[in-house]
Amino acid sequence: MTHATIACLFAAILIVLPFAMSDYHVFQLTTVVIYSIALLGLNLLIGFNGQISLGHGAFFAVGAYTAAILLQRTDIPYWATVPLAGAICFATGFLFGLPALRLEGLYLALPTFALAVATPQLLTWNALAHWTGGVQGVTLLKPDPPAFLPINADQWLYFFCLGCAAPLYLIAVNLLRARTGRAIVAIRDHSLAASAMGIDTAFYKTATFGVSAMFTGIAGALSALVTQYVAPDSFPIFLSLSFLVGIVVGGIASISGAVFGAVFVVFVPNLADSISKAAPLAVYGIALITLMYLMPTGVAGLLRSVRWPPRRAQQIARLTAKSKALDAEPSP
């Protein structure tokens, strides 16, 4: 089965699924799509560029509040808030990445962690409360589907989020396949060697941080449209940690891993709560530890290991045959 066939089959399943589910399950599926965008952005930063961030929940909040404030204060259509939120988060991430150039590894993780911790408090600050609604947050109206489509609002939001996710995944794939992607990965593998080869490490690091924040901000804006409510309590530090858990479970440095990680982030906490109302976090922790023992490279890594052995065996067989042919040739 070719990659094109698999992609078409996967797309057909995604299109049919919302018509075979209840509205609540469609909402969960939409949340998976939204979180996969955020995890894709974080994976570009951590998995492919090697910069550690524990604060992407802050960019998620910036995107959500950007969409909410624009919808509440202006007459802008809801779909236009998504690219605007992405642009604002790109600028925010790029500017945040400039001073972070002096930091690497865990030393970079600390200021991003501080950003995630401080963001909910900043949203309740009196100077911003007029815009953010303070602790009460901002309530939004659910967008109506186009009149010519025979679907309800939940199904429309699912397809709208899916329509936003598809080009973002295409952008990420093409970005990583281009020279820019090779430069990003080279910085992760060996920053000093990349700099010696003429790669502008400062620019690529800040640009990657900006692009990663943009993806997460777009996810935040979509989340605001779907949940119809934003408040400081919606963006705790656990959200940023959940994003990190998602890319590890899904697979570091993997495009498809963002989808698997989003499924884990959305469904496993609910499953843990249904198993034990008294200690859901304990069940969540046990599930996480079990998955890491069974799949130390994530779901995407497991699938690669299952798919590659036959290909590796063929390559070894070809090399062995070529070596025997060379040995069989008469020496001059």
Image (spheres, helix red, strand yellow):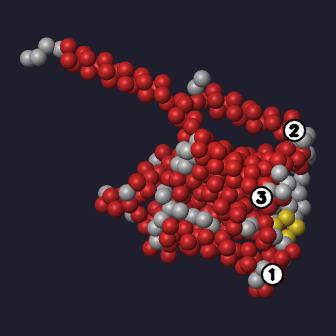
In-image side of 155 versus 105 (left or right): right
Query: Front-most of 137 and 262?
Result: 262
On the image, which quarter does residue 150 sit in? top right
- Which residue is disc 1 drawn over? 129
Above/below status of 158 relative to 93: above
- Which residue is disc 2 drawn over? 21
Mark 2 Cα-neighbour bin, 10 Å: few <14, some 14–19, many ≥20: few
Residue 81's disc is: none
Mark 1 Cα-neighbour bin, 10 Å: few <14, some 14–19, many ≥20: some
Query: Front-most of 123 and 83?
Result: 123
Residue drawn at x 31%, y 21% is: 320
Q: Which amino acid does label 1 sit on?
A: Ala
Q: In which quarter of the image is the N terminus?
A: top right
Above/below status of 100 relative to 282: below
On the image, which quarter does residue 201 sit in? bottom left
On the image, which quarter does residue 326 sit in? top left
Above/below status of 163 relative to 58: above
